Amino acid sequence: MTSDRALEIIGAYGAKPVGWPAAERAAVLAAAAHDAAVGAALAEAGELDALLRAWAADVPVRQFDVATLLPARTIAAPQHSRVLRWASGGALAATIAAVLVIAAPNLVSGVSPLPTRIVAPLETASTDTEPLEGFALIFTPTADEEDLI
Amino acid sequence: MQPVPSLAVPDELSALMLRVQRGDRAAFNLLVRALEGPGLRLADRTLRDRAAAEDVVQTALSRLWSMADRFDVERGSVAGWFRRIIVNLCLDGVRARRPMLAIDDALHLPSSAPDPEAQAIDTDQKVRLMAAMAQVAPRQRMALAMFHGEGLSMAEIAEALETTPKAIEGLLGRARMELKTLIMAQENEAQ
């Protein structure tokens, strides 16, 4: 192991060997014993470790009220297999089709095509047509409306 | 310093979560008691704002119940899932709020050290650390809190932050280096 890697591990994980990567632990300890820079880094890291442990733990404890944590939720429906879900969907569709055939046969067998009506397009207002004339083409007043007019 | 309970007990907690999925409120109560402390520490250390941290944990715990059907024990532990919820809510909170003052909020910290001189030194160090913490990125604070507070592995932290263990190693290394530099700069200013 290089000194740089040993310093890297101590720099990231701190001074406690138990936190170091297991595969590199022995090599880091050996480097600390033989390399003054690594040994110094190890000693220095211990101070920061202690500060960080205190920092991480120094949070007042609070118990949350469980009753207020229970919003309404929808319990998921039991998970059936995909085949069963497809089968139930198919059965429903078949049932609806059968009811339609029996109860309203005309809808299925006697269906005549809807009468088609060709609707001539309304005359568009041209530059020489007054707007009211175009309006009259589509508005037929009732008798009462005629009186009013 | 009191020992910090770890989130890393997935089997027991995930078993509770499976009961929660079936609507078991007693199991939910146990799950809340197990996760609220670690969740609050992570959110508080990340956001540096107690009220915001409590809101985050409240929301995250509530989601354990309301989104229970989304938990899949085969995809990971409930502790890991909960951590990811906390992390995402914290990052949302960080994005949403305005920048906070770095040093002013860290000036008056209580200490349990009995000796006045030791207390002064202890408080001084804490103040400098807190001020330095305000300067590092929220993701760095998260990684530091999970590693030094909860004792999580690089893999567990990587899962929570959705990255690789190698990236977490780099993140922690940079965070510690920045903290050391910032603390030293404060000490030099004080002298």
Image (cartoon, helix red, strand yellow):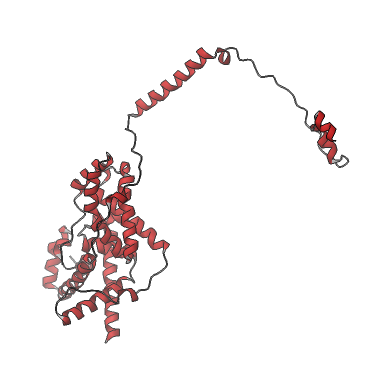
Give the camera-side residue of A119 and A13: A119
Residue A99 position within the rendered picture, expressed as x and y whole percent measured from the top left: 48, 16
Viewport quadrant of the N terminus of chain B: bottom left
Q: Is residue B148 above or below residue B82?
A: below
The residue located at (37%, 27%) in the rendering is A85
Tell me which residue sits at (27%, 72%) in the image: B177
Indicate left or right for B188 with A31 as reference: right
The percent position of residue A108, horizontal first and vertical second, equals 56, 15
On the image, which quarter does residue A9 sit in? bottom left
- Residue B162 placement (x, y as % from top left): 32, 54
Nearer-the-camera pick, A19 or A92: A92
Q: Which quadrant: the C terminus of chain B?
A: bottom left
The reply to whether residue A12 is in sight is no
In the displayed structure image, the side of residue A113 where residue A130 appears, left or right:
right
Q: Residue at x 28, y 51 (%)?
A: B82
Q: Is residue B6 visible?
A: yes
Q: Residue furthest bottom?
A: B191
Residue B184: name its quadrant: bottom left
Residue in front for this viewpoint, B174 or B142: B142
Relative to A145, is A88 above or below? above
Location of residue A125 in the rendering, given as x and y in whole percent from the top left corner: 82, 39
Residue at the extreme right of the image, as rendered: A128
How many numbered dots are placed on residues in this image? 0
On screen, residue A88 above or below B84:
above
